[in-house]
Amino acid sequence: MPDWTAPFHRPHMTTAEFEKQKANYVAKYGYTITLPGLSDIIHLGAEKPLTIEEQKAWKRKDKEFFGASRYYDIKLMKQKRKEKYLAMLGSPTPHVVRTAGSILTSIDDAQDALTTLHVIGRMAMHLAPRILGKIFAGPVGWILTASDILNLIMHIGRMGTMPMVSKRNKDAATKENPFSKKAKIKRATRMLRTFPNKGEIIEVLQTTDQIFGVGICLGPIVGAIQDIAFGTYRMLAGQPVKLNPGLPEIPPWTAAAQKSCKGMTLYMGAGHVTDDQEMLEMMAASYFAQQELLVGQDDGWALDHIIDVQHTEVLAPYPSNVLSLEVIEEEGKPIQDVIGWPHNSRPWGATSDIINEYDSVATAQLRAFMDQHKHDWMGFSVGNLATGSAMHSMANIEGEDVVSYDYTAQSKLASIMLENGLTLSQEQPAEQIQKMAVWIDQLEFEGLKPTLKSIVAFTDREGIKLETF
């Protein structure tokens, strides 16, 4: 089985070493993150955050401290926050209005994670070959259902490339495709003990688009160690939260990752996506954060430190960014009136409620976004990031050694046919091709694997025409 975590295993480092590495990186590259798309290279321009000195100068309205260029940049950063905040206050959905401050904070936390973690993280997305760009932009789309896979086989077959080249092109486009991959936890020890229903779910092999929500809704638990450090946990019954001793010290980059994970849960649970770029940034931050936590929580996992975590309450993301605080204050709403979890519009939410309420909402929101962008690089990039984030989140729940994955029957059939230089003839009724799509879906449903022998036998029996290339 391939080592799917191989792209990221950072060494342990001190804060001073990290700050030096970050300063060197930013001096050379700036705050830019590069994502590979279908046929373009996509750049995420992360904000340059305010330093402590700049925050103090901003609060005392000392324009001369910044210089014209930096002052303009900061004003632009604030204006973007104001536009997002006003859009939320004008939302027809009441829970968005009541939790606008927390949603804005979740976006802040994602930006903070991007500017912090992109220095030590790695964007290990799989670039789709340019040769497939026109196909995905037109008749097929990158989501790849059974019918799409068969159409892809026919299009690749017409390109006239060698069989193994064709297979590699297909693999590059589907390796992290959420609709081509299945994953599960071999033994959900912690989750079964704490959240039995979710533990059973992640033990079942399922397509990765179905585990998006499970991974995202666990954000507050993954980020629990930092919350404990700030005392932002309480018991439902009003009793003190009981903790095991030996909580590890949290370096700033791990803290940024934990905050981002919690913020992503609220963001996806609110169902409020203001623009495509924002979704891409949130998903990239989630991917980086989950990578970091594979290493960052080696010394202590949240469920090992909180006793009776199911009955604890978590504080919703609370603004700390000086610009966001200013925007909220200028609009005249008390901060406590715009802080809360989407499902109850209150500052505190029970972990059991968050986990049970948000997984289906998060999955539906991501699925709708990717359906909308199934013919462009934006959807492909978000889908890749979501798949990687989901896999890492499962490892962060139980440990990377207990995560296993496999490919769907649809993906395996495409690999077998292309490797053997086989494609479907277009000189036959569409009903014949649809017949094969139904057969592939049935194999997947029954957990069976296609083989070259079974493919040839089925097509012969049903009179489906195959061609070689």
Image (tube, rainbow, N blue to C red):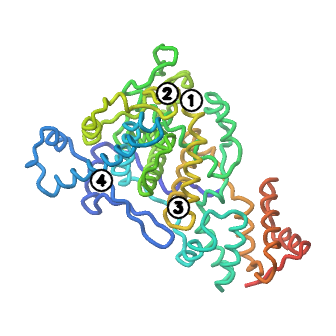
Callout 2 secondary element: strand
* Crowd rating for badge 2 (residues with CA inside 10 Å; few <14, some 14–19, many 20+): many
Outermost residue on the right side: it is: 461
Report the disc number at residue 349. 2
Residue on which disc 3 sits: 379
**Chain-order first, disc 4 or disc 3:** 4
Q: Quadrant of residue 204?
A: top right
Circles 4 and 3: CB atoms closer than 8 Å: no
Residues under labels 1 and 4: Cα distance?
A: 33 Å
* Crowd rating for badge 4 (residues with CA inside 10 Å; few <14, some 14–19, many 20+): some
Q: Amino acid at mark 2?
A: Gly
Residue 71 at what x, y percent from top left? 16, 52
Residue 235 at what x, y percent from top left? 49, 19
Callout 1 secondary element: helix
Q: Amino acid at mark 1?
A: Asp
Residue 177 at what x, y percent from top left? 60, 60
Q: Report the side of 199 relative to 342 (left or right).
A: right
**Chain-order first, disc 1 or disc 4:** 4
